[in-house]
Image: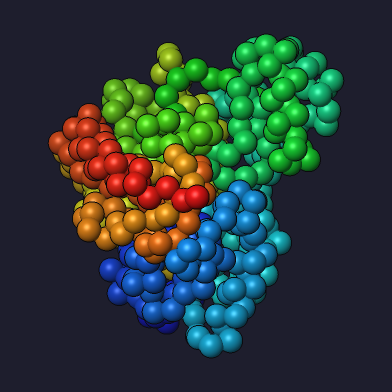
């Protein structure tokens, strides 16, 4: 596909407002298929379809229960009956649905890694076995069928262990077990979400990620990022639940070089192209352990663009179509944070359009269930701590507003 032939692009997934905005700034006519259907997404896009039809007085439901990749595919088919779309750009939510991706690719060419490559890196055990063969540090991981096998394999690995569903996104359902007694409870909890359960070595350290652009021959690390997980201050009830990021990661040059070397090796080995992310845990002694690959645009997009003063959609399309990668001269002195805010209680959404630093804006008057996303706050600062501090000031103002909007 020639870049000159790409005019209308489809952005697709559960977290796409920043992706849609980047595509529009890159000069494309943007169409969207997503879960939430937020106000700012509708303003950005020429046309959109969403699983949630936001209406005043109506609930947005629960993404964990109501999100369905097949429904996104059906919405795409509905959209294609009325609109001509040249290419698709992926965000989160479809990584573990290879059949849906294959059918989507037949309808609209996916710009990025092909479905067969996505399938390979998202097959947890095949991926980790390949990392072992390559000598890349990663947590020891096994699949178990029942609680007795879970106890046996956890003893072999050594407590504490991480218990997680074999598929999912956003860190939902992941639990830590410190002992055999805790394992019994966590195994029941996690196995109720998904038939297959993973038992994984727990790596104590800093959750991080790398944002990359790659062709089949070369990979460029754009930024290393700090992941924010399980922050009760923003209503995230899941202990490993994703609630934002800080770009760039504050790390020594030696640790940064080690991370970049590892993630470039992973991306090139699996022949991933375009925008991709690699999740890491940097151990307490500075060793980067690879956790998984996100073979699509990441939740860090908005922050990476602000820190580097670049356009990731344009860079992604150039890498996929022309095999041209961006030149990263030097990260600026700017830090950028994204905080995802969750509802502390069932509430009616207020008008958040008055907040300049807020994205993923819901329609005023809709009902947001307890524990579900409300919006995101994006803030720049001269340091990690100053960006976090400024973002938390806005966060507290929003929660002050939300306290007066509880739903019965």
Numbered marks: total = 0
* 163 over 84 or under it: above or below: above
Any part of residue 323 in sight: no
Residue located 34% across and 72% down the image: 43
What x and y, as percent, mark residue 264? 45, 40
Residue located 40% across and 27% down the image: 258
Task: State which quadrant residue 182 falls in.
Answer: top right
Residue furthest front in the image: 408
Residue located 48% across and 27% down the image: 281
What x and y, as percent, mark residue 156? 74, 13
Horizontal relation, residue 375 to residue 12: left or right:
left
What x and y, as percent, mark residue 338? 33, 44
Any part of residue 8 in sight: yes
Q: Nearer the viewer, residue 315 or 239?
A: 239
Residue located 42% across and 30% down the image: 232
Horizontal relation, residue 230 to residue 29: left or right:
right
């Amino acid at each position: 596909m020639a870049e000159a032939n790409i005019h209308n692009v489809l952005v697709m997934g559960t977290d796409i407002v920043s992706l849609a905005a980047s595509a529009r700034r890159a000069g494309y006519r943007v169409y969207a298929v997503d879960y939430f259907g937020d106000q700012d997404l509708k303003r950005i896009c020429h046309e959109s379809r969403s699983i949630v039809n936001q209406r005043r007085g109506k609930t947005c439901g629960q993404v964990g229960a109501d999100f369905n990749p097949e429904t996104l595919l059906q919405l795409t088919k509905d959209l294609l009956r009325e609109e001509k779309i040249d290419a698709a750009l992926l965000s989160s939510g479809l990584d573990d649905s290879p059949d849906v991706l294959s059918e989507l690719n037949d309808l609209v060419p996916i710009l990025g890694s092909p479905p067969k490559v996505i399938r390979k890196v998202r097959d947890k055990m095949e991926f980790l076995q390949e990392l072992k063969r390559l000598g890349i540090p990663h947590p020891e991981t096994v699949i178990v069928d029942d609680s007795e096998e879970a106890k046996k394999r956890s003893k072999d690995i050594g407590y504490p262990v991480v218990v997680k569903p074999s598929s999912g996104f956003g860190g939902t359902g992941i639990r830590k077990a410190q002992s055999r007694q805790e394992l019994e409870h966590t195994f029941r909890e996690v196995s109720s979400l998904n038939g297959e359960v993973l038992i994984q070595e727990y790596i104590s350290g800093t959750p991080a990620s790398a944002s990359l652009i790659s062709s089949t021959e070369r990979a460029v690390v754009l930024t290393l990022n700090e992941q924010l997980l399980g922050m009760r201050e923003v209503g995230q009830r899941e202990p490993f639940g994703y609630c934002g990021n800080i770009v760039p990661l504050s790390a020594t040059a030696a640790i940064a070089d080690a991370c970049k070397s590892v993630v470039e090796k992973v991306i090139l080995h699996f022949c991933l192209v375009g925008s991709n992310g690699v999740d890491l845990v940097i151990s307490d002694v500075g060793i980067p352990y690879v956790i998984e690959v996100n073979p699509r645009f990441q939740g860090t997009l908005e922050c990476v663009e602000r820190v580097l003063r670049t356009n990731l959609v344009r860079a992604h399309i150039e890498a996929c179509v022309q095999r041209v990668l961006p030149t990263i001269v030097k990260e600026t002195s700017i830090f950028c944070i994204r905080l995802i805010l969750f509802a502390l209680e069932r509430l009616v959404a207020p008008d958040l359009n008055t907040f300049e630093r807020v994205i993923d804006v819901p329609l005023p008057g809709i009902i947001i269930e307890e524990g579900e996303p409300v919006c995101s706050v994006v803030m720049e600062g001269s340091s990690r701590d100053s960006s976090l501090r400024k973002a938390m000031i806005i966060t507290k103002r929003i929660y002050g507003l939300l306290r007066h909007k509880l739903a019965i």
